[in-house]
Structure formats: C-alpha cells, structure tokens
Image (cartoon, rainbow, N blue to C red):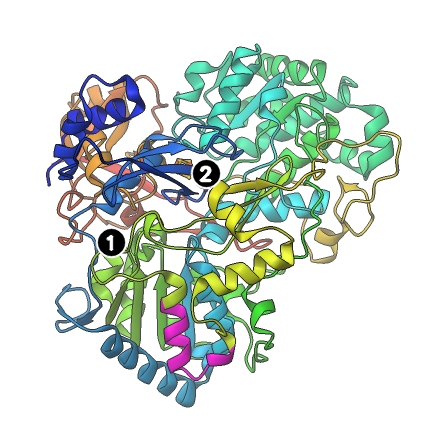
Amino acid sequence: MVWSRRDFLKIAVASTGVGIIGGTQVDKLLGLGRKPEDKPVYVPTVCEMCFWRCGVIAKVVNGKVVKLDGHPEHPQSRGKLCARGHGGIGLLYDPDRLKHPLIRVGERGEGKFKKASWDEAFNYVAEKMLKIKETYGPEAMALFTHGTISTYFVHLLWAYGSPNLGMPSYALCRGARDIAFKLTFGSPVGNPERVDLKNSKVIVLIGFHIGENAHNSMCQEFTEALGNGATVIVVDPRFSTVASKAKYWLPIKPATDLALLLAWINVIINEGLYDKEYVAKYTVGFEKLAEAVKEYTPQWAEKETEIPAGLIIETARIMGKNKPSVVIHPGRHTAWYEDNTQRIRAIAILTALLGAYGRPGGIYLPPKNPLTGYDLSDFCGVPYPEHQKPEINKGPYPFTEEEGVIPEIIKATLTENPYPIKGWLITGTNLIKSTPNQRDTIEAIKKLDLVVTVDMMPFDHVLYADVVLPECTYLERYDDIFEVKERSIGLALRQPVVNPMYDTKPGWWIAKELGIRLGLKDYFPYQDFEDYLKAKCQVLGISFEELKQKGYIEIPDTANPYLDGTSEVKFKTPSGKIELYSKQLEEAGFPPIPQYTKHEEPPQGYFRLLYGRVPVHTFSRTTNNPSLWELMKENAAWVNAKVAKKLGLKNGDYVVLVNQDGVKSNRVKIKVTERIRPDCVYVPHGFGSFSPMLKRAYLNGADDQQLITRYAVDPVSGSVGMRVNFVKIEKA
Ligand code: SF4
C-alpha cells in the first residue's frame, strides 16, 4: 500500500467526523471493504510512538484500526495526539515490518537471513546463552534496551544473572539531569518532567526545543502558558521553533550555557532577587554559593557566551520579578559535554533561589503514591541471583545508575577488560543510531558469540543480528500497567486493539519463552499476561475489567503539587534540605558548587555539530513509517546564510558533512538560514538509515550519529556528552 501525504490527511480529517471525504474512501485507503452496517469499536490503549505514553482511543472497523485519538481523561494526551501518535496506524500497517523470526545466513551486517520458527529461533539463542554462561559467567551477556519492552528483558537479564544493562535513555539522554536534581532536591524531576508550565509566568528554555520536541501534554501546557501571557526566554545557538514564540532569544555561543547560568545566579544573588524566606527555610549552602559565584559577573559571561551583559541582567531581573512562577526547564537530552551534571545543577540551584521548586508555576512536587507496586520480580517471588563480578555498565562514575553507560559495555566488549562480554541482547533500540562512535559498536559486534535483536522494524542494527525476534506493535499487545505520575497518580492499560499481524509476538511473551528455555521458568509464573495483570489489579485494589474498559483510572487524593509553607519538609538529600552546596559531590572529589569549564572550539573551517528533533519523527524509529515519512522524508542540515554564501552553496544544494575524524555523512540537503549562528551546523537526528530493509528511510538524509565519533563522559553521572564533534561542509 502506498500512502500519500494527501491520503494521510484525508484519513485524519474523514475520521474526525468533519470529513471532506466519506467513510468508504477511508476504507479504500486502508483496504477495508467496510459495509455500511459495520459498526466501529472504540478501544482505549496507550501510545508508544514515543516514550511519553499518551492515552489513546483506537477506532477499529472490521478488525482494522482506522483512527487513533487522544484519550480525553489521560493527563498526557488530554484528548489529543501529536502527529507521531496519529502515525501509529502507519507503524501497524508498514509493509516493511519484521514478520517472522529470522536467523542469519550471511555475514553480520549483510542483512541476509532465513525465515525460522519461534522454536528454532529460541533454541538457537538459548543454546548460545547457556554456553556463554557456562564458559564466561552470566555477566558476559549485556542488554541494550529502550521502551516498554525493557520491563521484560531487564527482568530476564537479572534473572539470568547479569548486571550489564545499557539504556540509551540514561547516559545518552536524561541521566545528567536526573542525577543533578537528585543531588540538589533528593528526587529526579520525573518523567514527564514535573514542570508547572501552564501556571508559569516565565519559561526559560536552554537548548530545549518545545514544538520540535513534540511531547503531547508538554506542548499543550506550553501553549496554555503562552495564552496566559507567559514570558518565554530561549537560549539557543539556533532560532528554533520555540524561539519564534519567545520574547527573548539569546543566541548563545555553543558550549557556554553554564557561564550564562552562573551569571544569572550572580545577578539574582547580588541584586537580592532571590526568595530569602524560601532559601532560609529549605536550602543549605547559600553563603558558600554567594561567595563562589562572585567571579561570574554578567560582564565576564558576555565574553564567554557572546550574550550582552545588559541582556543577561535584564533576563535575570525578569525571573526575579516573577518568582516563584518561573520554569527553567531542566531539559531532557542533556548529554552535551563533560560537565552535564554541573550544568543542570546550576539550573537546579537557580530554580531553588527563585523559590520555584514545589511552587505554582515552577516545578510541582511528586504526587502522593499510595500504590504498593507489584512488578514482575514481586510477582514471581524469586530473588535475582547475586552477581559474581563487578558491574561493567556503571564504569568508574560514582553517581551513575543501574541503567548504565552504554560506551562502557562497548569498550569492555572490545577489550575484554575487566572481563569478556560475549553476547548482546538488543531490544527496542536502534543501537547503531543511538550510540556514539558507530565504528566501535560495529567492531565490538564482530567480537561477539551472539547478537539477538527484538524489534518491530528492520532498523540498522538488525542487519548485524544472528537472530531477529519480531515483536508485535503496541496496538497488538498487552503491556504492564503504567503508573502515570503527573500532578496526581493514575493507572493506564495498554491492551490489544487488534490481533498481532504476521508471526509477531508481544515482548512479555518473547522474554518468558526465552526465559523458560534458559531454565528460568520460576521467574515467569504465568501462562498469559492477563493472569499477571489481573493479579496486579487485585493488589492495586482496582478492577481489571474497569481498567480495560476505561483505559485510564485516576487514583483519588494523590495530588500534592506544591510545598505547604507551614509544615516542615524533609527533602531526600543527606541534609534533608535543598543542597545548593553539595557535600555528596565534595566527598566524591567534585566541585560542590558548579564551576565553569571551557570546551574545545571547532578548528578552522569546521563547525560544531548540533542535532535535535523534528516534530513528526521519534529518533530513527519512525523515518520509515508510511504516514510520517510522507510528512518528512529526509532531514536538512541548517547552515548560516553567510557561511553558505562563502562556500558558494544555495538552499537545497546537496552536501556531505565530514567530521574531525574524516567520517563522511550521506549526502544531505542544506537549509540556508539566518536562524543559526555561523559557528555551528544543525542536523535533525535519526535520518539516513543504511538498512535496505527499510524501503522508505534507506539513505534518506544524513545520519548525525555517524558523525558523532567522539564523546566526552561526565565523570559525575556517566552522561555521554556528544556535542563535541565538528564538521566541515563539502559539495556532494
Ligand atoms: S507524545 Fe505523541 S508519540 Fe509520544 S506518546 Fe504522545 S501521542 Fe504518542
């Protein structure tokens, strides 16, 4: 089936009921053959076109999904979906989907496979995994995982006996942010972030791209804030979509954001703009902070950031005047440089000075959670085995988390130090497109005894697998109940809307069946996932049938958004207070208050490589989606107009980008624009797939990750800074 942009829009409009075309035309586009008497069925479920996990109502006719809409009760969708959410139908009916288990017949990387039965595939994997365990110990298996499937495969990895887990969402994305907030406030900022956007008077976005980063409820609340007259301050070398909504755009020199933050702290303290009562009541270390930031004057910061001192002062005053209703967004993809944790610590400290943590329009508090929790490990009641060897995935970084630092696992696979890693399980993540230094990843793969991938689509990394296990899409399966932690707590159920197509299976089933063949049956004591979900509902005190029918149930009396100024509050930090000065960092040998560090500048003729999102795609996962591909087929590299003129390039010309290590990108169009500083080039992430099994995405645009051969690891959290690469532009 070939869908055009026109068709996609027609489906969207027709099925909202205000259509310009009738139902029969929708049927034709989807190949339905619907009769007039056929009644649609509406099934609530949960989107997984990105990790935001919005509630969805699926409209199903004759066993086919014809429309997806936002669940009106679910706090992350509020009756709406983003473009990618609507594109879920494209994923379900993508003819390039993985359809059967596959076993490799060619060399790794060639993408040559034979069709296999599930039994054959499981036996192959189990035999190799048991051999690895026997020869090298269970720690020699590593898991790379993202998305809901992680629940089942982390359980499997830990039951098997390995700690070596790598989730790109930690070290390659939000890790530094979570550690910085934990160090300062005792808890991470949450997922979704607990930013009270709709009540904000001032929203400060530092390299954070609302609108390009299209997380549903976040976009809705931001729009609400704009409607309420909020002042938006955007700090970005690029005039992003959200910069076009801002009162202030500060086109900062890349890699100097910490200088600006420290100067803002300097102004807020010097001019007495901080919340004195709040600071006295809830924080520790103010005096030391005030002393430490004396040197970071706006005049000093102007030299570093190229933002005029007057503008630094003016924007600081706006924050001070509107406190505490100020959101300085802590970001999500914070893996930029080697001082990521300290940069986000500065955001946290500024937030605390403004009294904005736990206050209306700032960052709201975690909801009260009366649920006891009941996950897979509780359900099976068998403890995980003790690890006999150290965790390679945590590296030497003292504050890192169990989600791990992926490059550490890759390094250990290459060097066999401190011990060999011999098998990789890759589930729900396009490892090659999410990890820096693709050459190392591919070299490491060559050394392995076993590479298994579980996914829905034949992404780039699938070409390197020995065994491919096809997972069904989120519209065809149950998943574990989601605890939705927004301002209150709710429970959401993902349930099958249609039966799995082809010979595909849910992630929970794949993990269980593999577990049984690995002798881990006791860890999977359920026949069907419904058994587990029903038991879990009983523990949670809700009706499974009601959850199925409603899709989302809010737990009453769990809202706890703001600090109660009268009562004593104990933060989960060692001091029980918000730690402006962090003893934990000091004791681990790091600056207890953020200090500015300079980063390497691009060499002559090179530009700093920046990357980001487009609103119609999620990483590389949707670039082959028939409906979303129609909306954006390839990316374009943003190049400043003066630079383009100097290089003799015009808008739409194709170029190749060549990085400091001589790695060349696919050919990519350039977007000649005034909307970017002349010292950087910006490339939307996720394009340029080199998997020929993805017929639409194949070699469309440039793969930014291919150019990220260098990275700088933050010694505090293990966050992997990737904005340390430089590119030059050559004619294609
Ligand atoms: S933000 Fe969009 S893609 Fe992500 S879960 Fe929500 S609707 Fe789906």
Cβ at disc 1 under 8 Å from ligand 1: no
Q: Residue 520: say if magenta.
A: yes
- What residue is at 24 percent from the left and 23 percent from the top? 14
291 shown above or below 311: below
Image quadrant holding the C terminus, namely top left
Judge left or right: residue 446 versus residue 6.
Answer: right
Of circles 1 and 2, the one toward us is 2
Would you say residue 383 is visible in this rendering? yes
The location of residue 598, given as percent across then percent down, is: 53, 39
* Left or right relative to 370: residue 502: left
Q: Element at badge 2? A: strand
Residue 357: give x, y in percent of width and height. Answer: 71, 32
Image spot of residue 595 (x, y percent): 64, 40
Q: Which residue is mark 2?
A: 55
The numbered dot on residue 519 is none
Q: Quadrant of the N terminus?
A: top left
| First-in-chain label (1 vs 2) | 2
Figure quadrant, ligand 1: top left
- Amino acid type shown at disc 1: Met
* Residue at 67% from the left image edge and 47% from the top image edge: 182
Q: CA distance from mark 1 to mark 2?
A: 23 Å
Residue annotated with mark 1: 457
In magenta, the rendered stretch is 510-522
Residue at 45% of width from left, 76% of height from top?
A: 417
